[in-house]
Amino acid sequence: MSLPTFDPAGLEPRSATDELRERSPLARTPDGTWVVLGHAEALAVVEDAESFSSEVSRFLQVPNGLDGAEHAAMRAATDPFFGPEEMARLAPVLREVAGGLVEELLDGVGAAGTEIDAVAALGAVFAVRGQTAWLGWPAVLEPELLQWMSDNHEASRSGELERTREVAEHFDAIIRSVLAPRRAAEQDAPEDPTTALLRLRVPLPDPEVPGSTERALHEEEIVSILRNWTGGDLGSIALCTGVLLHALAHAPALADRVRDGSDEEATAIIDELLRIDDPFVSNRRVTTCPVSLAGHEIGAGERVLVHWTSANRDGRVFPDPEALDPAGNAERNLVYGAGPHVCPGRPLATLELLTLLKALLSAADVRPGETPGEREIAPVGGWAHVPVVLVPRG
């Protein structure tokens, strides 16, 4: 049976995949890449890390661009940075950041409210301030990081490899500018996650030390980790904020539940809204051996794209993909992936989004803006611009 052709050019990810998925859980791009559209098929790929390798990028990606024992060792060393103790330490810091930003946006605003772009004015700024506060980076980097987010977004939308290389190298330069003074300070460096990475030892043998069972991180590994933590998170939080504020602005009763309910209920609603309109569009894999998927034979060395936005709307799992069911859909929600390469930063992203929404909705009601919004188009998901009106609560 021939597969449908996946060509998302000019389309947003949901409209690019909803009709295709009804015809087949698999598709192929014009250049031959296999595209996994179905929920069960996505799980089959990401849970079989031996057959579907994550080592696909031109750039070093630590830890989730690694495989096997090296991936497991790096995850064991770095996952505690997102553990309960670190998130508890970070929570009041993020509340202060979110509260300060909301106060800025509402300063001098009258009863009629003010229109903002939830992506640029709220999500992007909060992401930069939250990440720099967490990692201990200088606040003066905010303008440069915001400009980098814009450049990275445009490079991603262009699909031009040279542009993506340039923005990646720019971000690496920002990271190295933060690392250099800490290395110079040695023991006097500030105690924060960035310094902790410089001092971290991973459970991998050091080739230069016979019999060793652990080693320090190499410079390029530290840069890669910080690039993935920060570069990836900045754009993701901004896009998620756009998706969430667009939904809540059109559903005041749901916004009330997020504001007044428990953290657990609010988190479940956040996750479900992101399932319905998943901005984390896809991840790549490459086959290491011949495999069978959904009745099709895939050879070794073939490119595979797991389309999370599509899998999270699979009618075989979610009979009405648009229906909001936070509790019922939680276990099948693939917003943060699955398998051994499941997103390590989920606790941080969850805390950031929960903190931002609680701070905003406590201070203001959110209504749809008069300015039209703009959807993102592939390969980016969610919303490019979400105009909302913030009305101060009395």
Image (cartoon, grey):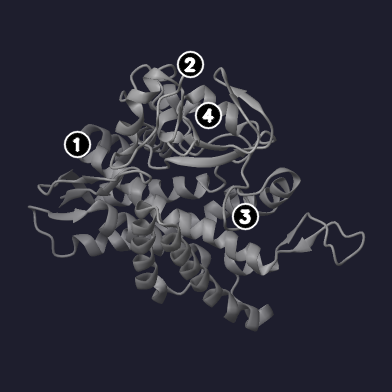
Question: Which residue has dot 3 on it?
Answer: 62
- Taking 205 as reference, is 21 left or right? left
Question: Which residue has dot 1 on it?
Answer: 250
**Residue displayed at 59% across by 33% down:** 46
Q: Name which residue type carries label 4.
A: Ala
Q: Which structural element holds mark 1?
A: loop
Q: Earlier in the sequence, mark 2 or mark 3?
A: 2
**Residue displayed at 53% across by 48% down:** 345
Is the C-beta separation of discs 1 and 3 under 8 Å? no
Real-space CA distance between mark 2 and mark 3, rounded to the nearest whole angstrom: 38 Å
Mark nearer the viewer, 1 or 3: 3
Q: Name which residue type carries label 2.
A: Met
Real-space CA distance between mark 1 and mark 4, rounded to the nearest whole angstrom: 31 Å
Neighbor class of circle 3 (other Cα within 10 Å; few <14, some 14-19, many 20+) is many
Label tally: 4
Q: Name which residue type carries label 3.
A: Val
Q: Position of residue 323 (x, y in %)?
A: 31, 23
Q: In this view, does 107 lie above or below 295?
A: below
Question: Which residue has dot 2 on it?
Answer: 1
Q: Which structural element holds mark 2?
A: loop
- Taking 287 as reference, is 1 left or right? left
Classify residue 166 by image quadrant.
Answer: bottom left
**Residue displayed at 37% across by 70% down:** 142
Neighbor class of circle 2 (other Cα within 10 Å; few <14, some 14-19, many 20+) is few
Real-space CA distance between mark 3 and mark 4, rounded to the nearest whole angstrom: 22 Å
Q: Which of marks 4 and 2 is nearer the N terminus?
A: 2
